[in-house]
Amino acid sequence: MSVGFDHGGSFAGKDAAVVVLHGFTGSPASFIPQVDALIAEGFRVEVPLLPGHGTTVDELAETRFDDWWREASSAIERVIEEGLPTFVMGLSMGGTLTLKAGVTFETLKGLILINPAIEPPATSFFELARSLVEGGNKFLPAVGSDIKKEGISEPSYPETPIEAAISLFESFDTIVEGLPSIKVPALLFNSLEDHVVPTSTSDFLLSKYGAKIERIWLKDSFHVATVDNDSEFLTEKSIGWIRANL
């Protein structure tokens, strides 16, 4: 197995490099089909395990968005320095990090976004979340394994740490400010039915994004589309798009 719940991976290759970023409370295991296919295609693939993930939910509760971005950006910088055309692919919070990469690294060749989280929530959300923390609550129910395919689950945490989640949502405003300046083309996958990130989020993204962005609807998958019914379709489209944008 190329990657798993508790480990990412670094794989040599040529033609193009792809940095793959998993979601909040999830793990690199959410990308096993895509990582295996990218490796088989001969691409250079880098899959960081983001801080607090692949261990325990209590460890994740002590991390924040800056920690995840530090790890993701370090991986991207290392790959860019190797000289191959570099793409970044992300799911959910991984999509948030991918968009920040598009704002930060002008030399990227493209972004692949899968049900990305980017639309800032209402002020009332932050008020409620902070009141829960003040009331002694550290966790909310799990957000992982929103998958339509029978018998498939995502290796992820059984709970969602509230303060870590707040830090994710607080990151959106700064990233959104930079979206119009992005010059990197993007491929956007949206599930028609998503119980974690509403599809309106990507409508919001499309209204802000500064470069060409191609949207593809996934008709038979929920949020974790990378391992759902549309997984093979998503993988094939991604590889074809990378090839077309070299």
Image (tube, helix red, strand yellow):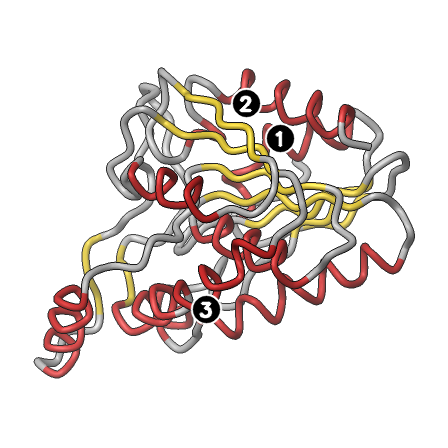
| Type of amino acid at the residue the image marks with label 2 | Leu
Of tags 1 and 2, which is closer to the observer?
A: 2
Relative side of 147 to 178, left or right: left
At mark 3, the secondary structure is helix
Find the distance from the CA under tag 2 to the CA under tag 3. Answer: 29 Å
N-term mark: 3 or 1:
1
**How many C-alpha atoms fall within 10 Å of the one at disc 2: few (<14), some, or many (≥20)?**
many
- Which residue in the structure is indicated by mark 1? 34
Of tags 2 and 3, which is closer to the observer?
A: 3
Disc number placed over residue 115 in the picture, else none = none
Disc number placed over residue 234 in the picture, else none = 2
N-term mark: 1 or 2:
1
Q: Position of residue 23 (x, y in %)?
A: 45, 50
- Image quadrant holding the N terminus, namely top right
- Which residue in the structure is indicated by mark 3? 174
Q: Position of residue 239 (x, y in %)?
A: 70, 25
Q: Are marks 3 and 1 in contact (CB under 8 Å)?
A: no
| Type of amino acid at the residue the image marks with label 3 | Thr
Q: Are marks 1 and 2 in contact (CB under 8 Å)?
A: yes
**How many C-alpha atoms fall within 10 Å of the one at disc 1: few (<14), some, or many (≥20)?**
many
**How many C-alpha atoms fall within 10 Å of the one at disc 3: few (<14), some, or many (≥20)?**
few
- As drawn, 33 above or below 56: above
For residue 155, say whether it is visible: no
At mark 2, the secondary structure is helix
At mark 1, the secondary structure is helix
| Type of amino acid at the residue the image marks with label 1 | Gln
- As drawn, 55 above or below 115: below
